[in-house]
Image (cartoon, rainbow, N blue to C red):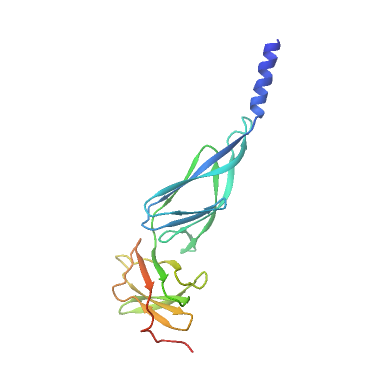
Amino acid sequence: MRTLLLIFCLAILLMLTACNSSGTLKVINRSSYNIYITIDGKDIIIPGNTSKSVEVDTGKETVLTGTRTKEVPLVIYGETWMIRIYEYDEAVYLKNTNIKINSGETYKIYCDPILAAVKVKNYQDLAITAMSYTIHHPPFSEFTREIILPDSIQKDEEFFSPLPPANVDDIFYYTFNIKLADGTWIPYGDESTILYVDQEKVIDVIDVSKYVTKIH
């Protein structure tokens, strides 16, 4: 009788004993450029054509609670990939979402490229304070859009912005205008700047002495 009681007590103890549990987020980057994520306060960069797994704490788990599920806020975006949803047939791109991680399981996100991009690297003393791009559909039309900078781009800093890609049924080229802190506007790009999915235009801002277009 004592043996049965001891076994029963041990069984109850085991059921009530809690241990830390965790699940895994795995991001598979199928694009050629970086994916950036923030989860549980960790900032992580996943280079192109690689993957990375991140362990996520899901809390205490017992036999009684079974698998634990934790909803986690996630920031995730890339240079040529972003979360895309459609509202009234119009594409909307997001950086923030929430995912549910189960203990003992792996939540996978596959990042296949869907965008083009431009990346600006500032190698000169003046900060970059504004930027725009123009899409040219020769000989019919063109339109210009401002690129929203997170802040002024200082010397030795860089910035990227995803862009709509060209395709075989819609071929167009880009030109770019970059404004410096002294009012100088620098043009980049020409008829050869056609960007398809998973292609990125890199602009190195180095010598601006030859540009004199200014706003006074």
Q: Quadrant of residue 213?
A: bottom left
Residue 203 horizontal side relative to residue 55, left or right: left
Position of residue 147 measured from the top left corner of the image (x, y, whole percent) = 46, 72
* Residue 187, placed above or below residue 35: below
Q: In the image shown, does 157 or 100 lie closer to the viewer? A: 157
* Residue 191, placed above or below residue 198: below
Position of residue 16 measured from the top left corner of the image (x, y, whole percent) = 67, 29
Name the residue furthest top. 1
Name the residue furthest bottom. 216
Position of residue 172 measured from the top left corner of the image (x, y, whole percent) = 32, 72
| Residue at the (66%, 21%) spot, across then down | 10
Q: In the image shown, does 83 or 7 lie closer to the viewer? A: 7
| Residue at the (40%, 61%) spot, across then down | 80
Q: Quadrant of residue 78?
A: bottom left
Residue 19 horizontal side relative to residue 79, left or right: right
Quadrant showing the N terminus: top right
| Residue at the (42%, 75%) spot, across then down | 124
Position of residue 134 measured from the top left corner of the image (x, y, whole percent) = 39, 76
| Residue at the (42%, 82%) spot, across then down | 185
Residue 100 horizontal side relative to residue 52, left or right: right
Q: In the image shown, does 27 or 41 lie closer to the viewer? A: 41
Q: How many labels sit on residues?
A: 0
Q: Quadrant of residue 198?
A: bottom left
* Residue 117, placed above or below residue 64: below
Name the residue furthest front. 125
